[in-house]
């Protein structure tokens, strides 16, 4: 028989890791290939390395090689358990960047920023998804006009995946899809975390350039679960110029900068920066204070990604299910478009200068944020 490492890898591309939903070669799970005559030995890492799972993997590899190379081949496979952190690094291999939109407190317009970010990036030709991780107050379905969407499931490689809704070029999943419109979501922390993980990891996202995660306000179970489970590209912090909001924003930033978390903060967005009356376009009223987000970004040496004014049409657009960034040839579109450009530049700089974020082994209740 005549075969080499390339032909072995080509054959093994037909073998999928059952829990990760992609072939073992693309996921980088095959190593230590040795060929001697008709014999081939190699190692394969698996997320679930239980005996029955190992046996099925061995049989799948042998069958793929026999079919591609010939029945005379002798196959020896060493199955190794994929470490939890390594599994998380590979669990969303088709998503290039995962961005958490966070805020220290509620009411600063975080979901509005997240929705317009997703649509703004899609307008630029990127493939984008958004997860509404605000488990207790999901608002993304309303903002994307998909309130009545009921998710279907799709079977891929013998595993069932949730099919996201799609509107304005963005794929959308929210816990709001799984509850009645007027039904309160009353869950304890572990239940909420489990639901969130299903939305992220058990969805058919396909190929994405950006996955936007609209998180709940504050720093709690959901945020810890995300950094434990997903190697975030970075976080965007939303605040108003008000001192109360800025104090809480500093706490959110401090959490992501903690030694055992170390998620890059891509920058700050100052929302509701000023109010301009429709009939007096040259006037600015700094209702929540002036330059608070800008001063915070300077003091912490972070990027100020944008200032978004308090404009009635932004609220109206969100309520109507059509994000404001879709308002063509308006000042609103310009503000959000400039913000998206700054965000893209910050992400590109982060990816060029920093290593990929590692999933962090955080135990609930362990991190203390005293800032």
Image (cartoon, rainbow, N blue to C red):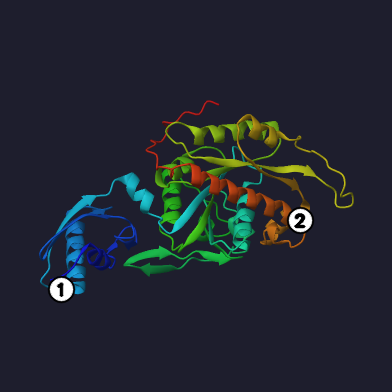
The residue drawn where x is 29% and y is 46% is: 83
Q: Which residue is mark 2?
A: 313
Image height of 282 relative to 323, above or below: above
Quadrant of the snapshot with the N terminus:
bottom left
The residue drawn where x is 60% and y is 31% is: 300
Q: How many marks?
A: 2
- Callout 2 secondary element: helix
Measured Cα–Cα span from mark 1 to mark 2: 66 Å
Q: Which residue is mark 1?
A: 70
Name the residue nearer the viewer: 301 or 36.
36
Quarter of image, res 8: bottom left
Image coords of residue 114 (percent x, y): 60, 51
Instruction: Check disc 2: other Cα within 10 Å, few if <14, some if 14-19, many if 20+.
Output: few
Left or right of 83 in this view: 267: right
Quarter of image, res 328: bottom right
Quadrant of the snapshot with the C terminus:
top right
Image coords of residue 234 (percent x, y): 51, 44
């Amino acid at each position: 028989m005549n075969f080499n490492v390339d032909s072995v890898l080509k054959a093994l591309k037909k073998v999928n890791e059952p829990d990760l939903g992609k072939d073992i070669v693309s996921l980088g799970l095959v190593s230590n290939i040795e060929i001697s005559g008709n014999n081939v030995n190699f190692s394969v890492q698996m997320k679930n390395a239980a005996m029955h799972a190992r046996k099925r993997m061995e049989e799948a590899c042998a069958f793929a090689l026999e079919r591609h190379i010939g029945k005379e081949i002798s196959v020896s496979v060493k199955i190794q358990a994929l470490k939890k952190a390594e599994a998380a690094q590979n669990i969303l291999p088709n998503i290039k960047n995962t961005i958490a939109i966070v805020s220290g407190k509620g009411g600063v317009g975080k979901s509005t920023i997240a929705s317009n970010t997703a649509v703004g990036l899609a307008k630029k030709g990127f493939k984008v998804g958004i997860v509404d991780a605000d488990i207790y107050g999901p608002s993304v379905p309303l903002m994307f006009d998909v309130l009545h969407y009921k998710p279907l499931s799709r079977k891929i490689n013998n595993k069932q995946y949730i099919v996201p809704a799609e509107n304005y070029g963005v794929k959308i999943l929210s816990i709001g899809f799984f509850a009645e419109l007027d039904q309160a979501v009353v869950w304890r922390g572990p239940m909420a975390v489990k639901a969130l993980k299903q939305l992220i990891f058990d969805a058919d996202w396909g190929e994405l350039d950006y996955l936007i995660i609209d998180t709940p306000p504050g720093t709690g179970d959901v945020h810890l679960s995300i950094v434990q489970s997903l190697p975030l590209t970075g976080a965007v912090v939303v605040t108003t110029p008000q001192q109360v909001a800025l104090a809480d924003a500093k706490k959110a930033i401090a959490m992501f900068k903690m030694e055992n978390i170390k998620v890059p903060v891509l920058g700050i967005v100052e929302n509701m920066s000023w109010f301009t009356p429709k009939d007096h376009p040259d006037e600015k009223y700094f209702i929540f204070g002036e330059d608070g987000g800008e001063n915070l970004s300077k003091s912490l040496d972070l990027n100020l990604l944008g200032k978004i004014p308090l404009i009635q049409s932004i609220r109206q657009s969100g309520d109507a299910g059509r994000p404001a960034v879709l308002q063509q040839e308006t000042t609103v579109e310009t503000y959000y478009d400039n913000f998206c450009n700054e965000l893209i530049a910050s992400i590109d700089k982060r990816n060029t200068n920093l290593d990929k974020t590692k999933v962090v082994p955080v135990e609930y209740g362990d991190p203390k944020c005293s800032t």
